Image: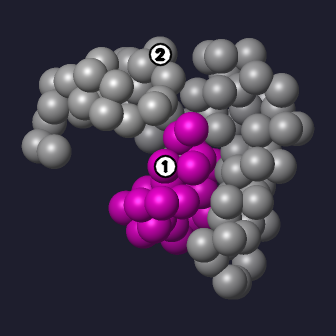
Amino acid sequence: MSNRSDILNLVENKIYNVDLKQIHLVFEYEIEINSLITKNLGLNWKISRINSLIKAIIFNAIILINFCQANKKIVIDQSLNLIKKFFWNQEYKYVNAIIHNCTK
C-alpha cells in the first residue's frame, strides 16, 4: 500500500473489516494527533522513536475517545491489553500515560 487512496480503496471494497470513519479521522487529524502525542512525550523522546504498532494503538485510542465518544476506560483497557500481548516490558505504563493525557 503506497498511499491513502490505496488504503481507503481496500477498506471501501471490504477487504479489511474496519470502520471507515476511523480511517478518515486518522487522515484528517493526523497532524493534530501527532502534535498532541509529541506534547505528552518525555523530554528526550521524539514521536519517531515510538514503535509503529504502539503508535497505531495510541492513534486508535485517541480517535475513539476524542472523536467517536467511546468510553475512555474501556478504550484504554483494550489498548493496554493489546500492548501487553505484543510487548513484554513496561510499555503499557507509558502508553497508558500518553493516552490518558491526550484524552482529557
In this rendering, the answer to whether 19 lies above or below 60 is: above
Query: Residue flagged by tag 2: what amino acid is it?
Result: Lys
Secondary structure under badge 1? Answer: helix
Q: Nearer the viewer, residue 42 or 12?
A: 12
Secondary structure under badge 2? Answer: helix
Q: Which residues fall within the magenta stretch? A: 39-60
Quadrant of the image occupied by residue 12: top left
Return the x and y of residue 19 as percentages of the image width and height: 50, 23
- Residue 35 seen: no
Q: Residue furthest left?
A: 2
Query: Residue flagged by tag 1: what amino acid is it?
Result: Ala
Foreground: disc 2 or disc 1: 2
Residue shown at 83% from the left, 49% from the top: 77
Residue shown at 16% from the left, 31% from the top: 6
Return the x and y of residue 28 as percentages of the image width and height: 37, 19
The residue pinned by badge 2 equals 21
Residue shown at 76% from the left, 23% from the top: 70
The first of marks 2 and 1 along the sequence is 2
Label for residue 56? 1
- Is residue 57 magenta-colored? yes
